[in-house]
Image (tube, rainbow, N blue to C red):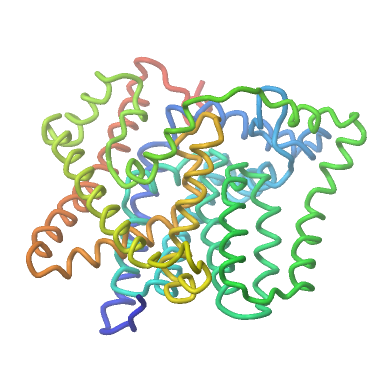
């Protein structure tokens, strides 16, 4: 699966992709004011908790801002500490947004590294391009919203885990154990990744460095000391609330099955208040909603073809898997490693009976985009359809590069117009 890097264009191309990705994200801060239609309430709560943390309030020191369920919050204080550090760094809440932008720009590089170390170039550059320019990847980089940190943490985690399954007694198991305990303080979507982690470790059958694993777990456990102290002082109220999850099966979990496709497109009506608002967004960005809709449809076709080619590659790699799983994994560890990290969490989420939202899957971005980059590279090699597919991918990519800053510029104009009033942080400061 993996091929050596050839040619001098790879470092220059990666650098340009990083600059482009950073520029698109900064447009969301400068023009779009870091506003998110569905996430602004959570952003305001995060700001409030960060201020409380700065004041030394006890509750902010051990409970996070994100809700675990209707009765409990996530353990803290890492999310509040990140927001507080960003505020101190930037002098305002926009400093925290800038920190998240920088972390997600670094995720572009982490995605490239994961792709290069597993499936290799030229798919690595395609994966980086997707990480830098896909609307979902950019949008979930430009607001105070706790899931936005997960692609960065997921990229670090997948790189460490890949090293662990490649060689015996890898010291990188320390980071696997540590990150597994860090991530729940930002979002609980990490729980759907746990079965995949266990499966790849079982299939790889490499010997684990137990001391480094214990060191990582112990280091992660120390991060929960403020939470344990706070809960002991309050009768474990939050922990008991976390255990009181609502029962019953919900069909909304099946939405997870469409997440890989939807995350690879630019069909984003959920970012607007209504269908009329989405049509207005298309007209504002492209002059015609028909042009925008055509780009939406083309991106869906391209994404479906990429996923289909990737599925064929995974299916071929799984030949004989059910008879001898470890032999099949040993024969094609790269693509099966990534397929398990994407497919198993999606299937677990679909079968969990809990409602699923698209941002639950962004922790999978580095692995998903690596597979997508490989799929594009395979399509472009076809002597019959390669040129046509390459042209379609480039049209979608260029459309995304135009759409994202245009969307943020339109969003900023709507915020400044003030009809209706939009509670961005700049508007709230001016009131």
- Foreground residue, 95 or 140? 140
- Foreground residue, 91 or 237? 237
Q: Quadrant of residue 161?
A: bottom right
- Foreground residue, 228 or 428? 228
Please count the marks in the image: 0
Instruction: Tell me if residue 280 comes above or below residue 131 in the rendering.
Output: above
In the picture, measured across the screen, residue 74 lies left or right of residue 238, that is left
Instruction: Tell me if residue 298 comes above or below residue 314 in the rendering.
Output: above
| Residue at (52, 56) in percent of width and height | 152
Quarter of the N terminus within the rendering:
bottom left
Residue 332 location (% of width, % of height)? 42, 73
Q: Quadrant of residue 163?
A: bottom right
Residue 370 location (% of width, % of height)? 38, 62
Residue 196 location (% of width, % of height)? 56, 55
Q: Quadrant of residue 12?
A: bottom left
| Residue at (63, 44) in percent of width and height | 186
| Residue at (76, 60) in percent of width and height | 217
| Residue at (38, 72) in percent of width and height | 119
In the picture, measured across the screen, residue 369 lies left or right of residue 62, that is left
In the picture, measured across the screen, residue 313 lies left or right of residue 301, that is right
> Which residue extends farthest top?
420
Instruction: Tell me if residue 300 comes above or below residue 268 in the rendering.
Output: below
Residue 280 location (% of width, % of height)? 22, 24
> Which residue extends farthest front?
323
């Amino acid at each position: 699966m993996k091929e050596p890097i050839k040619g001098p264009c790879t470092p220059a191309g990666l650098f340009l992709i990083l600059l482009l990705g950073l520029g698109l994200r900064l447009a969301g801060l400068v023009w779009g004011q870091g506003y998110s239609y569905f996430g602004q309430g959570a952003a305001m709560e995060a700001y409030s908790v960060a201020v409380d943390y700065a004041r030394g309030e006890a509750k902010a020191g051990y409970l996070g801002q994100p809700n675990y369920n209707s009765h409990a919050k996530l353990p803290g204080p890492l999310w509040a500490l990140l927001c507080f550090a960003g505020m101190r760094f930037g002098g305002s809440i926009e400093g925290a947004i800038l920190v998240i932008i920088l972390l997600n720009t670094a995720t572009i590089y982490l995605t490239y590294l994961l792709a290069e170390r597993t499936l290799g170039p030229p798919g690595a550059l395609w994966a980086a391009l997707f990480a830098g320019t896909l609307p979902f990847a950019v949008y979930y980089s430009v607001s105070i919203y706790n899931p936005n940190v997960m692609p960065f943490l997921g990229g670090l985690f997948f790189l460490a885990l890949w090293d662990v399954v490649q060689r015996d007694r890898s010291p990188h198991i320390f980071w696997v154990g540590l990150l597994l305990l860090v991530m729940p303080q930002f979002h609980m979507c990490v729980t759907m990744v746990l079965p995949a982690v266990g499966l790849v470790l079982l299939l790889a059958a490499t010997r684990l460095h137990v001391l480094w694993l214990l060191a990582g777990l112990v280091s992660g456990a120390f991060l929960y000391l403020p939470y344990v102290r706070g809960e002991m002082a309050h009768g474990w109220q939050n922990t008991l609330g976390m255990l009181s999850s609502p029962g019953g099966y919900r069909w909304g979990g099946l939405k997870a099955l469409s997440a890989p496709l939807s995350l690879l497109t630019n069909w984003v009506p959920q970012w607007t208040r209504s269908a009329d608002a989405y049509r207005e967004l298309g007209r504002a960005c492209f002059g015609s909603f028909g042009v925008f809709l055509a780009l939406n449809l083309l991106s869906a076709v391209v994404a479906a073809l990429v996923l289909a080619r990737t599925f064929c590659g995974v299916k071929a790699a799984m030949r004989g898997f059910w008879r001898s799983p470890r032999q099949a994994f040993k024969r094609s560890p790269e693509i099966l490693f990534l397929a398990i990290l994407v497919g198993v969490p999606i299937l677990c989420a679909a079968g969990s009976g809990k409602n699923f939202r698209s941002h639950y899957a962004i922790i999978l971005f580095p692995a998903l985009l690596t597979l997508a980059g490989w799929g594009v590279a395979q399509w472009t090699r076809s002597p019959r359809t390669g040129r046509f597919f390459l042209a379609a991918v480039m049209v979608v990519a260029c459309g995304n590069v135009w759409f994202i800053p245009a969307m943020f510029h339109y969003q900023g104009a709507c915020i400044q117009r003030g009809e209706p009033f939009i509670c961005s942080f700049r508007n709230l400061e001016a009131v």
